[in-house]
Image (spheres, helix red, strand yellow):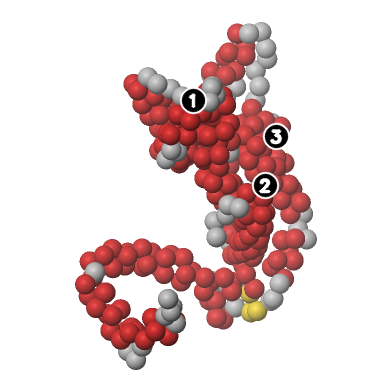
Amino acid sequence: MKTKSFSTFYMPFSKGKYAKKLVSDIVRDKYLYLLIVPIMLFYIIFQFKPMYGLQIAFKNYSLFKGIEGSQWVGLDNFLEFFQGPYFGRNLRNTLLINLYSLLVVFPAPIIFALLLNEVRNVRFKRFTQTATYLPHFMSTVIIAGIIVNFLAPSSGIVNLLIERLGGEKIYFMVKPEYFRTVFIGMNLWKETGFNSIIYISALAGINQELYEACRIDGAKRWRQTIHVTIPGILPTIMVMLILRVANMLEVGYESIILLYQPSTYETADVISTYVYRAGLQQAQYALASAVDLTNAVVSLLLVSIANTVSKKITEIGIW
């Protein structure tokens, strides 16, 4: 049988027919296209339009002169950050907090979803899901306030318990060595339940016939988890891991700002909080823009590397 060439398929849409068909499709599905308009406007106004201001990072920006009137200084703002006294400390704290979060916070929702998937009591399962989802929807200010009150040296429940057990009260919030543990523990409590939703959804999509085949072969629950459940959600895990690696230089600075103080800067001050102080408190907008632009470039490189490695090892990637 003779196959048709590409030109044969393309011919009906040539000489303006493709444009006419496109217009007719838009007219026919105009209400569906209208649904896309708010999303497009959001990205144009809040994502693409602000990119014009990225040139601030390469200028000696002045509010009175504006972007166009400010003097071009090239890479001076980047060099000021890299050669500054806080660069090493901020980079170290950012990487360590993200590394600890990757080792502790990232696998927690996966483990929680696997455990919850084994629960057969529907009422208990729903109660557990609701109780663990709630902290995510609470304001970061409220969560930080709860943590500070729980760890207060005089009336905090943690210190009262330590005192009852015969120990001495610990000033958690003013000692640098405790900050990372407190911060990661707060995020673990706040986000584990909510982040498990995507893994629970992935578990629901696994073909139940695979479990039936395992049971016929004599496999118990642990074997079923190893050979069916985990491979079934592996694509989801890898995609989430790639996105997590892309944010290795970004930390939730809102939580850190609410928890840290000058005495804990040694372990708490990260790149994001430095940008906040330099940009908003010290009005060094050009320096803050340069640091943030550096973060964006490094994040792009990290997600590209993580995606490439993932595709080579597991054949799973986000593009």
Q: CA distance from mark 3 to mark 1?
A: 55 Å
Label 1 packing within 10 angstroms: few (<14), some (14-19), many (20+): few
- What residue do we see at 63% from left, 40% from top? 102
| Secondary element at tag 1 | helix
Q: CA distance from mark 3 to mark 2?
A: 14 Å
Check the picture and name the quadrant holding the C terminus: bottom right
Q: Earlier in the sequence, mark 3 or mark 2?
A: 2
- What residue do we see at 55% from left, 39% from top? 231
Label 2 packing within 10 angstroms: few (<14), some (14-19), many (20+): many
The residue pinned by badge 2 equals 94
| Secondary element at tag 3 | helix
Question: Mark 3 touching mark 1, by CB under 8 A?
Answer: no
The residue pinned by badge 1 equals 216
Amino acid carrying label 1: it is Ile
- What residue do we see at 66% from left, 22% from top? 170
Specify whether 14 is left or right of 248: left
Amino acid carrying label 2: it is Thr
* Label of residue 176 in the image: 3
The number of callouts visible is 3
